[in-house]
Amino acid sequence: MATNKVKQIHSFGQSIWLDFIDREIISSGKLKKLIDEEGIRGVTSNPAIFEKAITSSSDYDADITELAKTTESNEEIFFGLAVSDIQKATALFDGVYNEGVVGEDGYVSLEVSPFLALDTEKTAKQAVELWQKVDRKNVMIKIPGTKPGLEAIRQSIAKGININVTLLFGLPRYKEVTDAYISGLEDHLAAGHSISHISSVASFFLSRIDVLVDPLLDEKGLGDLKGEVAIASAKKAYEIYKKVFSGERWEKLAAKGAKPQRLLWASTSSKNPAFKDTKYVEALIGPDTVDTVPWETVIAFADHGVAANTLEQGLDKATETLERLKAAGIDLDALTQQLEDEGIEKFNKPFEKLLQAIEDQKNKK
């Protein structure tokens, strides 16, 4: 990783966050090196990432044994482990958080339990609990952008909590998420609080869209659109972003120091070996956005990625792509709802495995 191609992305107004965390990357100095040398400006985590971290090393064993002495619930033990990691990571990003516009970057994300994805009340309650436990200004609590999650997002923003909205696949839901954010800011302001410290991102998932849609394209005579639907959706989401975060309603909040809820591109590793491994990163570089990428994609981009201001290129083509899908009878809204449902399940399974691993560790003699 001799070059600074990842840093070049930031010159176009996009922040690269690492979609990975474990104790080794923090304690070994690797994460600090990625911040200093590659310009990594934040970290995201999810249940699958923590499951891999905790089950693939012995780094957590002693803490599990210790926490088990005072904590019966395996989920509480997990969050005890995770909060410790998140706190250590946020400390490494203090410099980024305080650089330039304070609070623009330098965030580390921790997700509420995936078991709560369809429960508004419990999600909102756990968001507060995790926010208070981590107790760092540069943490973001991740809440899934499900229908029940919308009100939990609004309530959390209204309490002054930084929120990373996750599992977004479709444009109608994304629009609802922006409204939940703005409404939450308005609620917080109306209660007499400052809103300038609140930060949020909306995580729009990419490659999973193409994995689901691409097999449908050939039978509809749309083979030329393979690998293009997710990117087209993302470009249309950015159009929504620009429209929502301008105009009278937003300007009133901006005058009080509100930050726009940036779009974050997630699921950016290429799942199809026929695609370039940096395809999704290269196609969506643009101002006021975040891209969260796995470590192997960071390395790939540093080696052979191309940094250019691409996000607003080909908007007409993006519109045409989605129109062609619709004309062919492919219901993208139904498919993105399917992806949301599957996304919840994809986080539930590793979380169950993680809790079982904690149980097994507790029972070791």
Image (cartoon, rainbow, N blue to C red):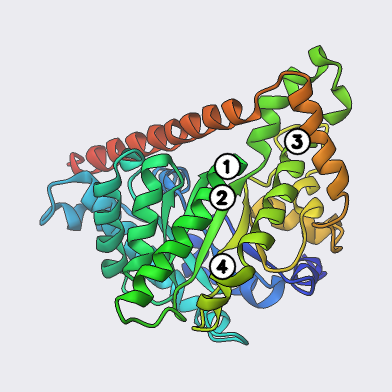
According to the picture, the residue beneath numbered tag 1 turns out to be 172
Coordinates of residue 185 in the picture (x, y in percent): 42, 69
Kindly indicate whether the residue at mark 2 contacts the one at mark 3 (C-beta within 8 angstroms): no
Query: Which comes sooner in the sequence, label 3 or label 2?
Result: 2
The image quadrant of residue 209 is top right
In 3D space, how far apart are the residues under numbered discs 3 and 2 (Cα atoms)?
18 Å
According to the picture, the residue beneath numbered tag 3 turns out to be 229
Q: Image point 44% across, 74% down: which residue? A: 198
Relative side of 348 to 205, left or right: left
According to the picture, the residue beneath numbered tag 4 turns out to be 42
Q: Image point 49% across, 83% down: which residue? A: 256
Secondary structure state at the residue bearing disc 4: strand
Query: Which comes sooner in the sequence, label 4 or label 2?
Result: 4
Q: Tag on residue 312?
A: none
Closer mark to the observer between disc 4 and disc 3:
3
Secondary structure state at the residue bearing disc 1: helix
In 3D space, how far apart are the residues under numbered discs 4 and 2 (Cα atoms)?
24 Å
Secondary structure state at the residue bearing disc 3: helix
Q: Amino acid at mark 4?
A: Gly
Kindly indicate whether the residue at mark 1 contacts the one at mark 2 (C-beta within 8 angstroms): yes
Q: Amino acid at mark 1?
A: Pro
Relative side of 161 to 326, left or right: left
Coordinates of residue 246 in the picture (x, y in percent): 64, 69
